[in-house]
Image (tube, rainbow, N blue to C red):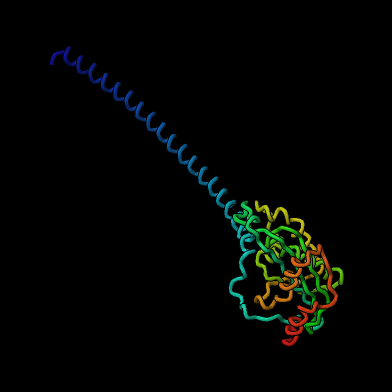
Amino acid sequence: MCRTTKSKIKKTMGAYESTARSNGTKEEEEDEAMMRLIASAMFGAVAIWGAAKMVDNTDTQERNRQSLVNSSFIRPEGLNQRSIWSPPPRGRFKMNTDGACRPTPVGIMLSRDCVVQRGPSGYGGILRDHNGKWIRGFIGFIGVADCLTSELHGILKGLEILDEFDLKGAILETDSQAAYEWVTRQGVIRGKSEIIHACWSTIMECRQLIRKNYIDVSLVPGEKANRCADKLADMAIEARYKYLEIKYPPPDLKYLVEKDAKFV
């Protein structure tokens, strides 16, 4: 092979090697750039997932709070609806409270609380001893409101009477699961509910009185167990008194009080 051919081959080989090295560098650079893009995309995906998880957790907490509002229209599940009122242990007292709302077609409110039925609302309560004896009753009218608001007002007034009489360790019963949850679960915060925002001071007062007087708050075991308080709440709407304490059982309620006392 002539020298010129060898030289051409060498030059060609050198050019190939140079081109190969150059191409290799470009490929490596492209690979590195691609890896950076992949890493950046993965980091972005993780960041988005984390943010979505935080939003999801926030939404879950809000849904849990929301369920407490919506459950004000539902009776506690699994409770025996045939149960009757039961007396407190000897030497203790029991307060039963209830709220009532008579929704009107124009009283339906659309809000963050979904569809809320509103109308003339009131509350009532009855305090009895271990013999089923009537100690004190009360009724109150709060105007146009909703079920949960009336239930919470009834609980607060019942707690205030227990505080006034200095009845430490008394029992308070309600048939509203939502109201029960709001006044007993100390860690639950307001959330976005318009109803709870409006009633927040009432809820906080209830919690404070429960702690102060060691009140045992519980759900009644059935509608019949709360029928006297239910009757008083209905009377509150009829009478339209802003607030009235009742020292003796009204004639149309006396029969129910005596009937409850028979099971003592």
Q: Nearer the viewer, residue 183 or 129?
A: 129
In the image, residue 5 sits, relative to residue 207, either above or below, namely above
Q: Position of residue 62 (x, y in %)?
A: 61, 54
Q: Nearer the viewer, residue 93 or 81?
A: 81
Q: Is residue 36 left or right of residue 133?
A: left
> Which residue is depicted at the point 64% across and 64% down?
72
- Quick one: quadrant of the N terminus? top left
Q: Position of residue 254 (x, y in %)?
A: 78, 81
> Which residue is depicted at the point 57% across and 55% down?
60
Q: Nearer the viewer, residue 115 or 77?
A: 115
Q: Position of residue 225 (x, y in %)?
A: 69, 78
Q: Position of residue 184 (x, y in %)?
A: 71, 65
In the image, residue 68 sits, relative to residue 225, either above or below, namely above
> Which residue is depicted at the point 63% across and 57% down?
105
In the image, residue 165 sits, relative to residue 20, either above or below, namely below
> Which residue is depicted at the point 73% across and 70% down?
217
Q: Is residue 190 left or right of residue 115?
A: right
Q: Is residue 186 left or right of residue 160?
A: left
- Quick one: quadrant of the C terminus? bottom right
Residue 11's quadrant in the figure? top left
Q: Is residue 155 left or right of residue 223?
A: right
